[in-house]
Image (tube, grey):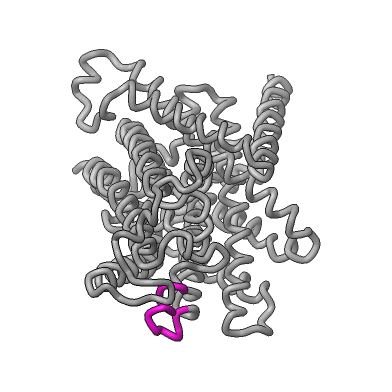
Amino acid sequence: MNILSKEKSGESGMERGLKSRHVQLIALGGTIGTGLFLGAGQSIHLAGPSLILAYLIAGLACFFLMRALGELLLSNTECVSFIDFIKKYLGPKTGFVAGWTYLVCWITIAMAEITAAGLYMQFWFPDLPIWVTGLFLLVVLFLLNSITVSAFGETEFWFAIIKVIAIIVLILTGVILVSIHYKTPVGYASISNLTNGSFFPHGFKGFFLSFQMVIFSFVGIEMIGMTASETKDPQKIIPKCINDVPVRIILFYVGSLVALMCIYPWNFVSPSSSPFVQVFQGIGIKSAAAIVNFVVLTAAASSCNSAIFTTGRMMYSLTKGSKNKFAKRLGTLSKRGLPTAAIFFSTLLIGLSVILDIVMPSGVFDFISSVATTCFLFIWSLIVITHYQYRKSLSKEQTNALTFKMPFFPYSDFFTVGFLVFVGVILIFRIQTLVALLGSVVWLIGLYGFEIYRSKKLE
């Protein structure tokens, strides 16, 4: 019997409980967050209709990123995370920096989402303390993640379904309103509203600046790189999910943006509130704000759920085989094949957000979150560079034997890394993003310096 057909994979010992629909929705749901439901109005005002083109270009880069990641995963489906490949092809020091950076990024994101969930709950219960919602959500998600990996997959599946349904409803609403030429408070729903005079209303400056928000809306797409060792029949499921998900993401993002700007001209879309609420209230749905608030609460819970899954696996991967007594405990699996100790510890770290909400000014935490998000440019670039090194290490016969090849290699790798560098350059031109970029550079240099010092001390 093939060892991979059993419940646990041979080398990692982790349970293979994730089905195809789980993996597809994990990758899809991980990228559809509050940025679309609440922040789309701000993005539209910055770039206008050209935002659609920005999403298409960023979507192409993310597709190549996913294909590079998929090829790495299929080369060894026993690896717990893509960090294992970075260590192998770019060196242990780079792997150390990438692993701990990715871990801290997700913990920071989860902290922000836990706080956001508490704020969303106050929409219905104004007197409910933020920490009560955060604590309840963390306990529930920890228990779900500690049962079986399929329990996590099922939870994330339904979280993602709620977000997807909300987007589909918006797109269908747009189609219907345009078809009947519906009268809105600012005119009529029409395809002509899409440009409203100009495709680049703020010139190329607004178009280029929008890439920062666009690319960061895809944060989480690489999460599929944490699922290979726990996926049933990864050789079949991983390629299918990678080929399907980018197209769906582009469809949902581009489709919802087109629907919004057909119903309301881009300059009438509210930059300070959810455009979803604006559309649904405009057609007479009085409970629109409550519905969208429920969706964004789900999105926050989904992001936190993904963070617990990801940080647990990453912490397990980074501490596995450690000689330190505490780290060694984190690098062990439960009888169910889950890194329960690592999941518990990462949940505790996320739970610190309750304390930070009290003692740390919001501006400081916003800065930390921005730095963490910016670091994803570094992580994604390493994945593509690792793929390039992997392909260069193969013989001609091994390359020909590959069943899931990166299209247009090596030019697709060059394009993707070049695009990510381009986004990094774009960050220089706004003070908020420049500060976050400098903070991420300081973090990465400091972490790399620490690893050099630690390595020398162990020699």
In this view, the residue in front, 118 or 289, is 289
Residue 288: x %, y % from top left: 45, 79
The answer to whether residue 38 is above or below residue 2 is: below
In this view, the residue in front, 332 or 252, is 252
Q: Please report the bounds of the magenta region as a residue range.
A: 277-288
Residue 281 on the magenta span: yes
**Residue at 68%, 42% in the rendered image:** 431
Residue 243 on the magenta span: no
Q: Is residue 265 left or right of residue 352?
A: left
Q: Is residue 195 left or right of residue 351?
A: left
Quarter of the image where one finds residue 18: bottom left
Residue 105: x %, y % from top left: 59, 46
Residue 281: x %, y % from top left: 44, 79
In the picture as drawn, the residue positioned furthest to the right comes out as 359
Residue 357: x %, y % from top left: 73, 64
The answer to whether residue 331 is above or below residue 96 is: below
In the picture as drawn, the residue positioned furthest to the front comes out as 197
**Residue at 25%, 41% in the rendered image:** 239
Of the 4 image quadrants, the one containing the N terminus is top left
In the picture as drawn, the residue positioned furthest to the top comes out as 396
Quarter of the image where one finds residue 234: top left
Q: Is residue 325 left or right of residue 198?
A: right
**One can see residue 77 in this view:** no
In this view, the residue in front, 99 or 428, is 428
**Residue at 39%, 84% in the rendered image:** 284
**Residue at 62%, 59% in the rendered image:** 112
